[in-house]
Structures are given as structure tokens and as C-alpha cells.
Image: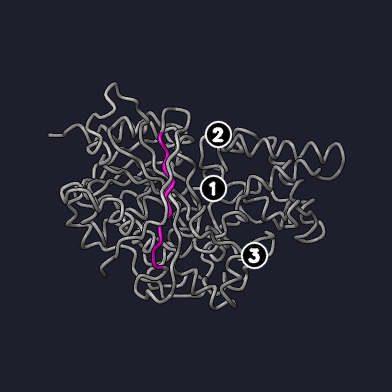
Amino acid sequence: MAIPAARILEQRSHLVPGRLKVTEHLFEVPRDYSKPSAGNLRLFARSARKAEKPADPEEDEPKKKQLPWMVYLQGGPGFECRPPQANSYTNFILDKGYQLLFLDQRGTGLSTPISASTLGLRGDDPVQADYLKSFRADNIVRDCEAIRQALTSEYPESKRKWSVMGQSFGGYCITTYLSFFPQGLREAFLFGGLPPLVRGPDEVYKRLYKKVQQRNKVYYDKYPEDVDRVKKIIQLLQRFGNSTVRTPSEGSLSARRFQQLGINFGFHSGIDSVHELVLRASNDLELFGHLTRPTIARIEHAQGFDENVIYAILHEPLYCQGTSPDWSAHRVRNEYPDFSTEDLDREGPVYFTGEMVYPWMFEDYAELRKLAGPAELIAKSSDWPDLYDEDQLAKNEVPVYAAAYIDDMYVHWDYAQETASKIRGIKTYITNSIYHDGLRSKMEEVMKHVFDLREDTID
């Protein structure tokens, strides 16, 4: 499929502290590249380059405007990019001689964002579900190609390829990019983002539940006093069903929702952040016999599903190629009784869950509650096109550099290894001392090692 260049609607530049020139871009692209009549989406991106005041203002300005592009693809799915000045790696990349583009992927941030209210404008549940199917990695990559052509239209042919870097789901998108549009890529950098090349999600979740179990053991080994605290909190939360405690946004703070705090276990300092919430909730129960509003608000703030609804609706379909997700994590969970809250008198702790999506979230979260209909249709859909081409990956010619984390709770190490073995020419930095958010929490260490792969040689 030939991808047309995006239409540039607007570009405005501003100087920001830190000697950065930030340009805000608006683009227009088809919602469905195979059916232009389906309408358009407006996409938003910010680019950053060094703001310099040379001694000679006329010094080779045309050449400076054509710095090579590095595009950052955010993790998720469903999360927008932070401004360039808010990312610790921005100056690292700029110092390497690139200009950096932060794209809000379709449906996120300012790129025709998806929410219950904006989806409601589309029509009934089937229409909304059909619309949502256009927001996976395959179309995100097409958007990238359309934008690349627009931004490099005046570049010489030899400089029209660009570089891409992706965190987590951003790496999944890059693997799709390598599969279907490698001709647009100069090089690729993946951080905790080597995807499972699977047809469906069940086996992925079976492995991830085991990884979450391991992180729970670490948590309770560090904070054994939290075994009883968590059980008492859960007992309160399910005393009168799943709506015993309400959140400030009118959602339900159920026991099963409280368990979802375990999604933080895979980050640096994530175990400590969950303990802080457990300690605060336990303190409320000891002093007052109920959870106070400040505590409930902190727990709700730690769970961003209402603000990033694509994550909940399209998380399982990112593993699907011709199969239906059918609430995979919910079905697979039954094989792991450590996560059950039914028998609080049993020996041992109640485990927190991880990066899993469940059908009951569309009851307990206020915004998701409005999207239960389309979410159910998405879960039952099987007409998901392929996201990867293993034959193309096997003959890949694009330089690829990846950071892979052995103790990653979200991208299982076994799958990361397997995928790396299928991408011709990939070079990997492998470590067991950095977690999934290494690009944020250990930026200098991760960037140094990955760019060493690019700049050095191995005989």
C-alpha cells in the first residue's frame, strides 16, 4: 500500500528554557489508509533542536534546517508524549546531531484524542468499535511514514530516511515499521520493546503472570508487614461488594481494582510506591476504620486508565493477528490462585496484579464504564490484520539496536530473546540490573550502552 504524504496544517516554533527550539506541528492523515473516504485525523507532534546563536547569523542556515530526524514513539498503547524539555534524553539525542520529533500517536494527547465523549460522537457501539480498530500499531506506523514524507519533502533523496526510537509499545511499533516500511528507516533503537511475535495473547499472559508473581515475592519479602495490611484493606473494599468505596471521579475502588496497583512493580522504586499507598490506607483503617479522601485520591491518581482509555481497550489486541483477545488476562488469571481475594484466611499474601486488563474494569472505572459496549465488541473481534512480517525481519537491512531487560515485568525476556533472534543484524544490550523504565530512570546508562552498539564494532 502506497502511503501519501501527510498534509502539514500548521507549524509554530518557540524557544524554551534549556536552549531548545520547540516546534509544534499539526498534520492531517487518513483515518483508514485503505479507505480515504472514511475521513481524516489531525495529528500533533513537537520537534526539538538546539537553539543556537552563532557568531555569524548567516552561517550555513539551509544545511542546519536539514538535520537528520530521530522520531520518538511512546510506550502504551494510548499514552501521549511529554514536551521535549521534560524528557531527560532529549539533549543526549540532540548532542548526537539529530533533531527530535515527539509524535502523539493517533488517539492520544492532542492527536484526535479518544475518550468516552469523543467516541460518542461517532455513533453506536458497533460504529465506535470499528473506529477504534484503526488505532493499532499498523496505522501508527503508516502515520509515521506519511509524516516522514511531509517533513523531508525538500531533503535530498539520500537524506529522506529517518531514525526511530521507541520505549516499550513504541518498540512494538518499530518492529511493525521494520516489517512493512523498512525503506523509510535509517536506523532503529528499541528500549524494552522487543515484542512477542505471537498470533494471540494467552501464552503472553501465562508468562507475565509468573513474572508478576516473582515481583510480588520481592515486595512481600521487603515489606512482610504488608501481608496483613493488604488483607485488611481488601476485606474493607469488598465488604459490601465492589462498590463499597467510591473514588472522587465516581468510580468504584474495589478490591480487584486495588490489586491493580501492582502494575507499578515493574518500575524502579515501584515496589516502594505501592508500599506507601498500602501504609497510608492501613493507617486510615487503624485510626478511623475507613479510607479517607486523600488516600483514595492518591490511589486513583496512581491508576491512569480513565485518562488513557486506548490502553484498556486496545491492550490485548496489540498481541492479536487474526485471533480474538476474548479477555485473555481475565481467563488466564484463573490458573493462578495467589491473585484470588476469596479466601483471606489462607496462609500467605494476596498478590497484586500487573499489566493486565479485565472486563470488570469497565464497571469500576468511571470513564471506562461508558465504553463497556465497544470494549466488549473489540474483545470478541478476530479480524485483526498482521502486525509483523517475519520473512522481512529475517532479511532486515536496517541497523537495529535494542536494550533488553532480563527482569522486565511487561515484556517477557524469553519473548524478547526470541524476537531478537529473528531480526537480522540486530545488536542488543542485555542487563539484569535495569527494569522496564530504564530509559527514564537510568537514562545515561541505557543510552550510553545502546549508542555504544551503534558507534563501536564487534569483530
| Residue in the picture at 75% in, 57% down | 250
Residue 91 is drawn in which quadrant?
A: top left
Quick one: label 1 or label 2, which is nearer the N terminus?
A: 1
Whether residue 168 is visible: no
Residue 59 is drawn in which quadrant?
A: top left
Q: Where is residue 237 shown, x and y percent of the image?
A: 77, 53
Q: Which residue was labeled with disc 3? A: 362
Q: Amino acid at mark 3?
A: Phe
Question: Does 47 sit left or right of 122 as displayed?
Answer: left
Q: Nearer the viewer, residue 246 or 4?
A: 4
Q: Amino acid at mark 1?
A: Gln
Kindly report the distance in space between the C-alpha atoms of the residues bearing marks 1 and 2. Answer: 17 Å
* Magenta residues, start to end: 21-30
Label 1's element?
helix
Q: Which residue was labeled with disc 1? A: 213
Kindly report the distance in space between the C-alpha atoms of the residues bearing marks 1 and 3. Answer: 25 Å
The circle drawn on residue 269 is 2
| Residue in the picture at 66% in, 45% down | 301
